[in-house]
Image (cartoon, rainbow, N blue to C red):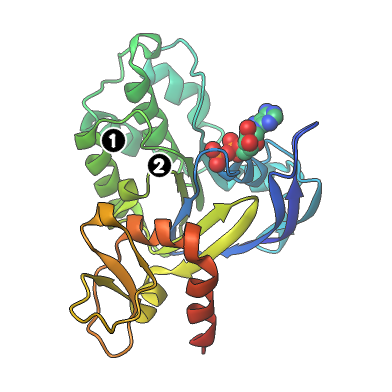
Amino acid sequence: MISIKSLYYHYPKSSMVLNDISANFERGNIYGLFGKNGEGKSTLLKIMSGLLYAKSGEYTVDHKSGLHRNARTLQRLFLVPEDFELSAVTIATYQKINGRFYPNFSKKQFYDLIAEFKLAPQHHIARLSFGQKKKVLIAFGIATNTPILLMDEPTNGLDIPSKSQFRKIMASIADENKCIIISTHQVRDLHSLINHILVLDEAKVVFDASLAKVSTEFWFGKPKSTEDSIIYTEAGFGGKSILPRGNKEETEVDLELLFSAVLTQNTVINTILKTNDHD
Ligand code: ADP
């Protein structure tokens, strides 16, 4: 659905922020776009949503170039940005003004989500907290029903109950026609939600694999035998480690551990993925 090939980007006078980025995003998936702060996640999402122009490279949505801000591509995607300014109007007016730009916008779905977030149409956006404003935007983004939904650090500013509410809502709206990409530097916020992981580090994609593939190739837990070949372990995780799965039973993927491992051991991890890649 979305194809990115050899994309390069840097801001004026800055070093390369995206250096030869390639990735594919398919319908029916929720992608976690991981990376530490400042690794280019927002920049990539801004390029995908037409807010920034790549210096070079290809970006296509359903085989049509997405690098130019054409209305057809823009109507097919919605970006919930990390930082935003919302007009100083009521939630009701906000949806009236903005909903009409999206052919599949559902007022009912928007108001249902607003109610789920304990907000009401008559609430004045200017008087809401940052987290509440974010909820308005998340609800609006979902209600646009665009086939591509991009969310940049959507859980920033949400309290812990709201984060789990966010995960539940996102899981409930996912379907085989939607491609959802969510960036975060707090990987645990997307636990049990995503089914594909991409990690950006030092301007490159250093990891790109489905969770199913990760479960097939790696084992997460406390190794019983000292003979086991540990790929990554961290004291902070209580001895929990990542090992090649071999013949061991399947374990739940620990996203935080995987993320830390990818940042320090990505050559080992990618070698295992590639060696066993028979797809
Ligand atoms: P992330 O979303 O992963 O935190 P960003 O895409 O926001 O990262 O930023 C990537 C890099 O680009 C950072 O080094 C950041 O300082 C720099 N950057 C972001 N926006 C601008 C800008 N408008 N002008 C110059 N540099 C920028």
* Secondary structure beneath label 1: helix
Would residue 239 be visible to someone looking at this image? yes
Q: Which mark is residue 142?
A: 2
Residue for point 37% across, 20% down: 130
The quadrant holding residue 184 is: top left
N-terminal of the pair, mark 2 or mark 1, is 1
Q: Does residue 55 appear to the left or right of 108 in the view shown?
A: right
Q: Callout 2, which amino acid? A: Ile
Q: Is residue 197 left or right of residue 48?
A: left
Residue 177 lies, in percent from the top left, at 46, 61
Residue 101, given in percent of the width and then of the height, sits at 56, 34
Is there a contact, CB below 8 Å, between mark 2 and mark 1?
yes
Q: Name the residue: 60% across, 59% down.
A: 205
Residue 1 makes an appearance in the image? no
Picture quadrant where residue 186 is located: top left
Instruction: Say the numbered circle drawn on residue 206.
Output: none
Q: CA distance from mark 2 to mark 1?
A: 9 Å
Check mark 2 vs ligand 1: CB closer than 8 Å? yes or no: no
Q: Quadrant of the N terminus?
A: bottom right
Q: Residues within 10 Å of mark 2 (few under 14, many from 20)?
A: many
x, y percent for residue 219: 30, 76
| Count of number-bearing discs | 2
Q: Secondary structure at mark 2?
A: helix
For ligand 1, the image quadrant comes to: top right
Vertical arrangement, residue 251 with respect to residue 85, above or below: below
Q: How far across and how far down the image is residue 231, in percent?
A: 39, 72
Q: Is residue 175 above or below residue 129?
A: below
Amino acid, disc 1: Leu
Name the residue carrying label 1. Answer: 113
Tell whether 73 sits left or right of 146.
Answer: right
**Does any atom of ligand 1 lie closer than 8 Å to the CB of label 1?**
no
